[in-house]
Amino acid sequence: MIHGPTSQTYISQRLRLHYVDWGNETAPPLILLHGGRDHCRSWDWVAQELRKDWHVIAPDLRGHGDSAWSADGEYSARACLYDFAQLIHQKKLAPVTIVAHSYGGNIALRYSGIYPDNVRKLVAIEGLGPYDMAQEDVEQLWGEITCPTLLLYGEKSWASNPAEDGRIEKFNTATVKLYKDAGHWLHHDKFEQFMGDLKAFL
């Protein structure tokens, strides 16, 4: 019988934040971080494929899923980044492998730039956002990322491809892969292709 994950919580900035733990604690840690307006259980199909080889943890960002809402309405990338850093610190997950989507990918990229020694490998699915975002400070952080990094983009997505708009030049160790006939949720649109690429990269 295949069991699902257990629900766990941790505290960051006085907020009780939720995550699911897929077990296998003796395996290397891997975090699956969702995007905006999403929740940790959207990764279930990915987690089930990885749980035999990894200790998979999928958190809910503040105000998402079963995590608490912020009393002061603070949902900035800065606040979510601190929460994410607290999860890794409190659970002693570093060096950790991270797979993240959209807004979660942006948070993971920021974390990897600030704490490069804490990240073993990084997969960011459409995590850079639109090209015209005000992100000069973030672009500086991307150059600090030292781990192998895979940036995935859907051909039919609204997000601009960093290999085409020049942003790939800000990275030291990143490669870009484009998925044909896929949108912003390429890991759902092309699940088998995504899992093959992900396992090969990891």
Image (cartoon, rainbow, N blue to C red):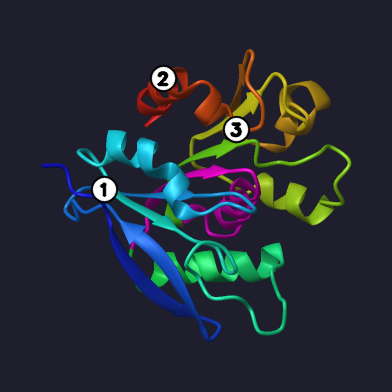
The extreme top residue here reads: 180
Amino acid type indicated by mark 1: Pro
Determine if residue 91 is in view: no
Residue at image location 81% in from the left, 39% down from the top:
130
Q: Which span of residues is magenta-colored?
A: 93-117
- Label placed on residue 192: 2
Residue at image location 16% in from the left, 42% down from the top:
2
The extreme front residue here reads: 1
- Looking at the rendering, in which quadrant would you find the N terminus? top left
The extreme left residue here reads: 1
Residue at image location 66% in from the left, 84% down from the top:
71
| Residue 85: image location, x then y, percent | 50, 67
For label 1, the SS is loop
Mark closer to the chain start, 2 or 1: 1
- Label placed on residue 81: none
Which residue does the numbered mark 3 point to in the structure image?
185
Which residue does the numbered mark 1 point to in the structure image?
28
Residue 75 vertical placement versus 143 (above, below): below
| Residue 122: image location, x then y, percent | 49, 41
Q: CB of mark 3 within 8 Å of CB of mark 1? A: no
Q: Would residue 95 appear left or right of 23 to someone viewing this image? A: right
Amino acid type indicated by mark 2: Glu
Residue at image location 41% in from the left, 70% down from the top:
89
